[in-house]
Image (tube, grey):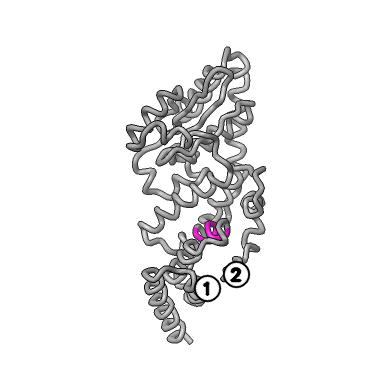
């Protein structure tokens, strides 16, 4: 049985996220990230973040023009963003939602690997440098294909510029994954992959914090991106129940039941009963 599609009209303001919902790849990732941040701050203005990125590019234009090669260009970007502006990561970034939101990352100068990498790529793009996100497990980095080699930048660790061999060796130690397994993950990430990764970071964090109200819009986006996923629908229903949206929870979970395995089905049926009982009490 096919699941009913979610109401995606809630994303009418989100031009870039809406592109992902119809399979488009021409997505401005800075704007898409800001659309996610707006879930936590409905009054968020996007322009200050865009201005900051353009100002850093303007600041670097003359220096980049005088560089001898791509590595020197990357080092100039690193010197500006990490050296002058202090962008980098810290372990406690992984326990703060603000580390996923570009405006707060710019303000605090601290962020997750993916948000820092996004800022690096956005500044580089305005300078004509084709820096791209590479979605390595546990630690997103930036990659630049040159005529001679591929270079990587780790914005989280003060913007280190690495060769492919150096990047693989370091990531292998960090992740305990063999270099030959890691290598395919260092290809450029499609916009959908980047957005889903940002959403999953927030989902995992909010779930650990039991912050159901904040988790609801995050899971709604994930479910909209994966409309045929029974697991995404199930998670949205369970989150709805925890967030006090019991009518929505009952509707979503009932829709999932026929497609669930027996262990999941018993848990979901119990949640349906609990939410239905609470609805009856309120009515």
The percent coordinates of residue 203 (x first, y second) are: 44, 55
Q: Residue at x 36, y 32 (%)?
A: 172
- Residue 41 appears left or right of 24: left
* Residue 83 screen position, x and y as percent: 45, 25
Specify the quadrant that holds the N terminus.
Answer: bottom right
At x 50%, y 57%, the residue is 218
Q: Residue at x 62, y 22 (%)?
A: 61
Does the CB distance between marks 1 and 2 fall below 8 Å? yes
Image x and y of residue 17, in percent: 61, 52
List x then y, in percent, for residue 239: 44, 66
Of residues 101 and 208, the one drawn nearer to the viewer in this rendering: 208
Give the residues drawn in magenta, as a range: 219-224
| Residue 193, quarter of the rendered image | top right
Task: Please say whether residue 225 is one of the residues in the magenta stretch.
Answer: no
Between marks 1 and 2, how big is the CA–CA gap? 8 Å
Which labelled disc corresponds to residue 4?
Answer: 2
Left or right: residue 175 compared with residue 214: left
Q: Residues within 10 Å of mark 2 (few under 14, many from 20)?
A: few
Seen in the picture, residue 172 relative to 280 is either above or below; the reply is above
Kindly identify which residue carries mark 1: 255
Residue at left offset 53%, top offset 55%? 41
Q: Is residue 223 magenta?
A: yes
Whether residue 161 is visible to the viewer of this picture, yes or no, is no
Label 1 SS: helix
Q: Earlier in the sequence, mark 1 or mark 2?
A: 2
């Amino acid at each position: 049985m096919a699941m009913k599609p979610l109401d995606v009209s809630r994303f009418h303001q989100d031009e870039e996220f809406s592109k992902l919902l119809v399979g488009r790849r021409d997505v401005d990732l800075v704007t898409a990230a800001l659309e996610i941040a707006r879930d936590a701050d409905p009054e968020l203005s996007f322009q200050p973040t865009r201005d900051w990125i353009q100002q850093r590019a303007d600041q670097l234009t003359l220096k980049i023009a005088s560089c001898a090669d791509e590595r020197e260009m990357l080092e100039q970007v690193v010197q500006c963003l990490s050296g002058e502006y202090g962008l980098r990561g810290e372990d406690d970034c992984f326990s703060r939602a603000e580390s996923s939101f570009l405006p707060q990352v710019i303000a605090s100068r601290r962020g997750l690997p993916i948000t820092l990498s996004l800022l690096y790529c956005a500044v580089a793009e305005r300078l004509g440098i084709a820096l791209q996100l590479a979605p390595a497990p546990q630690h997103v980095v930036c990659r630049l294909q040159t005529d001679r080699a591929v270079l990587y930048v780790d914005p989280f660790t003060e913007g280190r510029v690495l060769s492919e061999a150096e990047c693989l060796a370091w990531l292998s130690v960090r992740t305990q994954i063999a270099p030959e397994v890691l290598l395919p993950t260092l290809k450029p990430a499609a916009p959908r992959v980047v957005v889903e990764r940002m959403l999953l970071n927030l989902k995992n964090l909010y779930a650990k914090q039991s912050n159901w109200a904040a988790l609801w819009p995050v899971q709604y986006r994930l479910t909209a991106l994966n409309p045929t996923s029974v697991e995404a629908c199930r998670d949205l229903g369970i989150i709805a129940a925890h967030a006090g949206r019991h009518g929505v929870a009952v509707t979503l979970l009932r829709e999932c039941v026929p497609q669930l395995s027996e262990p999941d089905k018993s848990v979901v049926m119990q949640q349906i009963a609990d939410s239905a009982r609470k609805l009856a009490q309120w009515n």
